[in-house]
Image (cartoon, grey):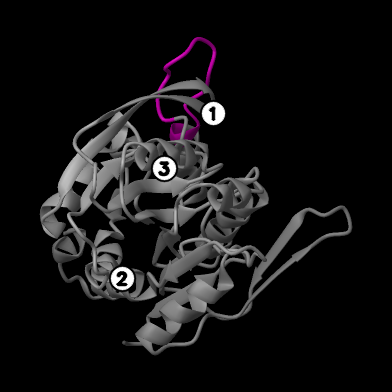
C-alpha cells in the first residue's frame, strides 16, 4: 500500500477498524473525537490528509450520534482537502424504512443517503444493505458487499443432516435461495404478518422441514421476535438442529432473552457492529468481516475490480 491511502475510524466500532488496518498493513490515521461541554460532537483530524484517498469506517447503529459523527468526519475531511472520501459503513442504520408502505411515514434510508452525499462523501462501501434498492438512493458509487461467503465457510464446517435454509420472511427469499444453492440445501419460507414495527405474528411454514437440520437466515437480528417464533414453529414441525445466521447483530429489546428461550442452539453473526457479552448459555459465534472490507478498500484504492467480492 502507498502512503496516499488513509484509514480513519469513528468510535462506533474501533476494533473492526483496527482489524481492517491490520489486514492492510497500515496504521489508522490519528483523529481526535470528543465532546464539547454541551455534549456536541467535536472532530479534529490530527494528520495532514491533503490529496489523500480517505476511507472513513463507521457503522451507523444507534444512537444517532454514530451517524452524526460520520457526517462530521466526512465534512472535516472535505475541508482538509482530501482527494476522495469513501464512507465505509459496515452497518447502514435507518435502513428499515426504505419505502412508503403506510401513510405519513418517512423513507429514512433515502434521508440518510442524502445526508451522506451532502456531507461530501464521494463513494460508499456498505455490507449487506437491508434492501438492495438503497443503492439507488445515492447519486454516487455504492458498493454493497455480502457477508455470505464468510457465513457459508463457517456453516460448511458443521456436520448438518438433510439441511434446509429457512427465510424468516418473504423479503429474504432471494438471499435464502442463494445460500441454499451454494450449500446444496433445501429452501423453506416462514410466511408471517407484521403487527407492529418490532413484532410479527407467525402464519405458516412453506416447505418440507421435518427431520432435517435448519439454518434460519436473515440480514439483521434486531429484537429476535421473528426468528424466535420461527424456531419454535420449526421445532414443533419436527426440525432437527436449529441455528440462526445473520450479518448484523443488533440484538435489541430483549433479543438475547428471546433467543435463550427458543430452540436455537447457536447464533452466527459478524462483527459489523460490536456484540456485547452476555451471561446466558446461548452460544453466539462472531465471524470477522475485516478481510472482506479490507480487500474491498484495497481494490477501490488501487483501481482494481471488486466484482469478485460480490459473489
Dot 2: few (<14), some (14–19), or many (≥20) neighbours within 10 Å? some
For label 2, the SS is: helix
Report which quarter residue 307 is drawn in: bottom left
Disc with the residue nearer the chain's start (2 vs 1): 1
Circle 2 or circle 1, nearest the eye: 1
- Kindly identify which residue carries mark 3: 231
**SS under mark 3:** helix
Q: Which mark is residue 175?
A: none
Q: Nearer the viewer, residue 146 or 223?
A: 223
User: Magenta residues: mostly which secondary structure?
Assistant: loop
Q: Residue at x 23, y 50 (%)?
A: 212
- Tell me, yes or no, if residue 122 can be seen here: no
Residue shown at the point (29%, 70%) measured from the top left: 154
Question: Could you say whether the residue bearing mark 1 is in a helix, strand or loop?
Answer: strand
Instruction: Give percent across and percent down for residue 173.
Output: 23, 37
Q: Is residue 75 above or below residue 302?
A: above
Give the crowd class for mark 3: few <14, some 14-19, many >=20 residues within 10 Å. many
User: Residue 272: x, y in percent?
Assistant: 46, 62
Residue visible at 34% across and 38% down in the picture: 131
Disc 1 crowd rating (10 Å Cα; few below 14, some 14-19, many 20+) is few
Residue located 54% across and 70% down the image: 9
Mark 1 vs mark 3: in front: 3
Pick the front one: 48 or 71:
71
State which region is magenta: 98-110
In the rendered image, residue 51, in percent from the top left (x then y), is placed at 41, 73
Query: Quick check: 292 left or right of 45?
Result: left
Labels 1 and 3: the sequence-earlier one: 1
- Kindly check if marks 3 and 2 are in contact, taking CB atoms under 8 A apart as contact: no
Name the residue beneath numbered marker 1: 199
- Quadrant containing the N terminus in the rendered view: bottom left
Amino acid at each position: 500500500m502507498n502512503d496516499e491511502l488513509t484509514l480513519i475510524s469513528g468510535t462506533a466500532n474501533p476494533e473492526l477498524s483496527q482489524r481492517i488496518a491490520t489486514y492492510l498493513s497500515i496504521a489508522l490515521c490519528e483523529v481526535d473525537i470528543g465532546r464539547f461541554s454541551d455534549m456536541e460532537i467535536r472532530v479534529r483530524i490530527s494528520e495532514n490528509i491533503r490529496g489523500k484517498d480517505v476511507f472513513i469506517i463507521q457503522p451507523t447503529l444507534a444512537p444517532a450520534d454514530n451517524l452524526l459523527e460520520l457526517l462530521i468526519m466526512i465534512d472535516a475531511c472535505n475541508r482538509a482537502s482530501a482527494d476522495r472520501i469513501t464512507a465505509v459503513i459496515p452497518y447502514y442504520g435507518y435502513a428499515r424504512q426504505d419505502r412508503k408502505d403506510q401513510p405519513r411515514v418517512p423513507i429514512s434510508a433515502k434521508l440518510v443517503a442524502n445526508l451522506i452525499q451532502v456531507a461530501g462523501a464521494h463513494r460508499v462501501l456498505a455490507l449487506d444493505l437491508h434492501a438492495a434498492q438503497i443503492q439507488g438512493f445515492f447519486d454516487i458509487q455504492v458498493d454493497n458487499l455480502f457477508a455470505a461467503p464468510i457465513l457459508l465457510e463457517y456453516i460448511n464446517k458443521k456436520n448438518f443432516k438433510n439441511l434446509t435454509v429457512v427465510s424468516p420472511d418473504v423479503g429474504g427469499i432471494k438471499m435464502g435461495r442463494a445460500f441454499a444453492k451454494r450449500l446444496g440445501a433445501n429452501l423453506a419460507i416462514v410466511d408471517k404478518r407484521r403487527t407492529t414495527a418490532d413484532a410479527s405474528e407467525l402464519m405458516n411454514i412453506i416447505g418440507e422441514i421435518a427431520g432435517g437440520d435448519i439454518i434460519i437466515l436473515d440480514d439483521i437480528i434486531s429484537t429476535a421476535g421473528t426468528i424466535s417464533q420461527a424456531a419454535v414453529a420449526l421445532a414443533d414441525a419436527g426440525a432437527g438442529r436449529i441455528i440462526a445466521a445473520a450479518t448484523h447483530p443488533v440484538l435489541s429489546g430483549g433479543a438475547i432473552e428471546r433467543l435463550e428461550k427458543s430452540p436455537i442452539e447457536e447464533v452466527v453473526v459478524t462483527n459489523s457492529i460490536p456484540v456485547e457479552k452476555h451471561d446466558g448459555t446461548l452460544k453466539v459465534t462472531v465471524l470477522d468481516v475485516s478481510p472482506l472490507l479490507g480487500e474491498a478498500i484495497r481494490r477501490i484504492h488501487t483501481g482494481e475490480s471488486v466484482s469478485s467480492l460480490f459473489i
